[in-house]
Structure formats: C-alpha cells, structure tokens
Amino acid sequence: MAAPITVPERTFAVCRAASLFCGMRGWAPVREMPLPNGRRADILALLPDGRFAVVEVKSCARDFLSDGKWPEYRDYCDLLYFAVDLDFPVELLPADAGLLVVEGREAALVREAPAHPLAPARRRALLHRYAVTAAGRLAALQDPAGLAEMRAALLVE
C-alpha cells in the first residue's frame, strides 16, 4: 500500500501541473514570484497578449481557509486563478476567480478568470520585475558558480 501524499508533495504536484498548463497555452510562468507588496505569488504568468495571470495553488481546504493573503494578488494581475487537485472542495473557492483542477500532470480549465486589467504604470513596473526575476533565475541555472561569486562579492562591499 502506498503512503499517503503529504501536503508539500501535493502542493508541488499541483504547482507543476499548473505550470505545464500555462506553458501549453503559450504563457510564460514564473514560480514563487515576489510581488511589490511583499507577497509571493505561487505562479505569475505572462500571457502572449501582455496580460498577467496569477495562479494561486491550494493543496487542501485548510490551506485555503487559513490563507487570507490571496485577495492581495488581484492588484498585480489581470486574471486570478486557483489551482487545486480533484480532492479539493471547490465550493470553498470564490466564484469571481478562475479555476484549474489538476489530476496528475494535467490541469483542466474549469472556470475562466474574469478580467480586471492592470493600470499601465503598474503593468510596466510588474513587467520589469518579472523580467529581472526570470533573467536572474536563468543566469543562476546557467552559471551557478558565477552566481555564488557575485553574491560573495556583494557581501564584501
């Protein structure tokens, strides 16, 4: 008999499937994206038309009920989605957000997110933050030793 899946494993699986969902639609997802308000979006995806979507991953009902931060993500996206697995009680989720339901590595769009367009200045600032974050992560993957050297040099200054 297989051991039950842990909450961190479930969170990782839902996040992975949601990221694949984004990629399959031509969206460019960045996981654990720091936002200007100090929050961190599970996934911030740049859509081909320049809009931003936040995908908030919820692993269980307790995760959703104990997290009052998600409404603050609306200020930094045009579209807000929740991503959950098949066991999640979806009636808990707000009707004014999109919904992705995950099974294994696949995610299905159950409800489209209503649009709430960002102001142009906020979009521009968010795009800059998104690009710097994504480029920094790519550089770290391409040259981990260089990243370590840079961090060490910054500590000395």
Image (cartoon, helix red, strand yellow):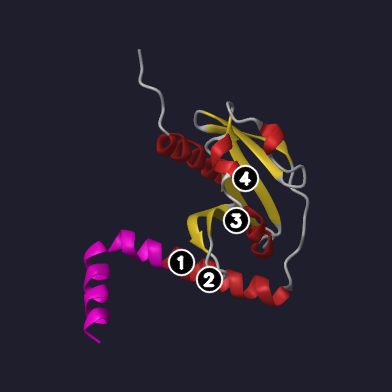
Q: Nearer the viewer, residue 77 or 63?
A: 63
| Residue 140 left/right relative to 103 | left
- Amino acid type, callout 2: Arg
Q: Identify the residue under disc 4.
A: 25
**Separation (CA) of disc 1 from disc 2:** 6 Å
Determine whether the residue tagged by mark 4 lies in a helix, strand or loop.
Answer: loop
Question: Which label's residue is closer to the chain start, 4 or 2?
Answer: 4
The range drawn in magenta is 136-157
Determine whether the residue tagged by mark 3 lies in a helix, strand or loop.
Answer: loop
Q: Position of residue 58 (x, y in %)?
A: 56, 41
| In front: label 4 or label 3 | 3
Determine whether the residue tagged by mark 2 lies in a helix, strand or loop.
Answer: helix
Q: Quadrant of residue 120?
A: bottom right
Q: Nearer the viewer, residue 53 or 27?
A: 53
Q: Are discs 1 and 2 less than 8 Å apart at CB?
A: yes
Q: Identify the residue under disc 3.
A: 69
- Amino acid type, callout 4: Arg
Q: Are discs 3 and 2 less than 8 Å apart at CB?
A: no
Q: Nearer the viewer, residue 95 or 150?
A: 95
Q: Identify the residue under disc 1.
A: 133
Q: Identify the residue under disc 2.
A: 129
Q: Position of residue 7 (x, y in %)?
A: 44, 35
**Separation (CA) of disc 1 from disc 4:** 21 Å
In the rendered image, is residue 9 in sight? yes
Residue at (64% x, 74% y) in the render? 124
- Near mark 4 (Cα within 10 A), the count class, few <14, some 14-19 or many ≥20, is few
Q: Main secondary structure of the magenta part?
A: helix
Q: Residue furthest bottom?
A: 157
Residue 148 magenta-highlighted: yes
Q: Are discs 1 and 4 less than 8 Å apart at CB?
A: no
- Amino acid type, callout 1: Thr
Quadrant of the image for the C terminus? bottom left
